Amino acid sequence: MKKKMISFASLGLVCATFFLSCETKNQAEEEQLETALETPAKIISNTQAATLFQNDQNTRLSQIGKENTSFKDKAIHFDLAILESYISRLESIKTAKNIPVTGVSFVFGADANGNRTMFLMPATRNTELDYQESFTIENGQFLTFKHVDITLKPQISSQNDENLVLSPNGYLSFNEATALFNNYQTQYIQPVAKKVTKDYYTKAVWYSFEEIKGYINYLKKKSVDHNLAITGVNVFFGVYNNDLSLELKSNAQTIFLTASSQQQSIINIKGETLQGFTQDGFFAKDSNESIDGSLNFNEGHLSPPPPLPEDCQNKTCWHPWH
């Protein structure tokens, strides 16, 4: 009888151990699944972000005599709460005015002193030219912001009554945004074009509402989970590698986003800074580094697209970054 009792007890211990093991395994799998679901698809590794940053310095700024641009001047800051409110407002306008707003474009600009900047505009799809076109509304007038144009013409009268163009320093009118856009053409694209031969030069990067909202929510969650006090998003210019496998993105200008905490650009949940990461030379690491814990966001859709090939003039072709 004792032997039977011992056997039953042993069996119970084995079962308990088995179920505990199963529970632990399932819990681990659930945690992995939760992590995968909460990480936006366009999160990139620290190495990838640092490489984009270094490429911009080496292939753009250094080529046009602006290699001494300070790190502070490279970080284009947007307050997280203001950015979130702006996205929400654009979605409301989409419904209220029945405009097919597809997302938001980070449009490139340069101020009167030649410093690069960025401003945000709502975008809608231009089906004729096959790209995401920015726009604003002033005095009830719908005004497009064509990135395919070399320069834009200011309006006779312009004021930001709808507040649809968001800069790091507040809202802009169409004419103010136009001045920044045109300055970028003369200060950065024209000098680069003499050094870097391209079929097109990026002037804006587009994200869908789902993408940008997912990134904001991701930062907010990481801020709480890891006590990071993230209060903003810093936008940096970057350049893709000169790699033929990237096709039309090869050596193309882009941007990447990362978190801002206590006036620092932090790139992961450990609180490491982008400035420290790049100065230490870690950008030379294997580009397959894990994205676990990364706070960097990229893979935006470049605008404008290059001219369509001859066999694509019938609009049946599709650009890979759209």
Image (cartoon, rainbow, N blue to C red):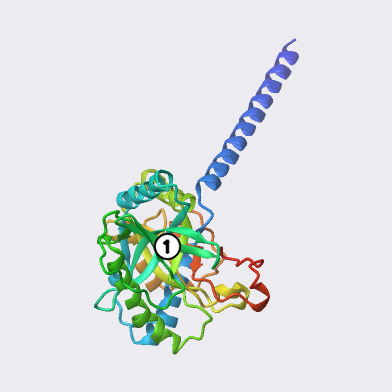
Disc 1 designates what residue?
134
User: Measuring 64% from the left and 25% from the top, which residue is drawn there?
Assistant: 16
Q: Which residue lies furthest to the top in this view?
A: 1
**Residue 73 occupies quadrant:** bottom left
Of residue 127 and residue 233, the one placed in the foreground of this image is 127
- The amino acid beneath tag 1 is Ser
> Please, is residue 132 above or below residue 10 in the view?
below
Q: Where is residue 7 shown, x and y percent of the image?
A: 73, 19
Q: What element carries label 1?
A: strand
Rendered-image quadrant of the N terminus: top right
Of residue 17 and residue 234, the one placed in the foreground of this image is 234
Question: Is residue 248 visible from the viewing direction of this image?
Answer: yes
Rendered-image quadrant of the C terminus: bottom right
> Please, is residue 11 above or below residue 147 in the view?
above
Q: Where is residue 316 shown, x and y percent of the image?
A: 67, 66
> Please, is residue 268 above or below residue 185 in the view?
above
Question: Is residue 277 visible from the viewing direction of this image?
Answer: no
- Mark 1, Cα crowd under 10 Å, few <14 / some 14-19 / many 20+, is many
Of residue 287 and residue 215, the one placed in the foreground of this image is 215
Q: How many marks?
A: 1
User: Measuring 34% from the left and 51% from the top, which residue is drawn there?
Assistant: 86
User: Measuring 30% from the left and 82% from the top, which residue is drawn there?
Assistant: 68
> Please, is residue 26 above or below residue 293 in the view?
above
**Residue 6 occupies quadrant:** top right
Q: Where is residue 23 shown, x and y percent of the image?
A: 61, 31
**Residue 157 occupies quadrant:** bottom left
Of residue 201 and residue 316, the one placed in the foreground of this image is 316
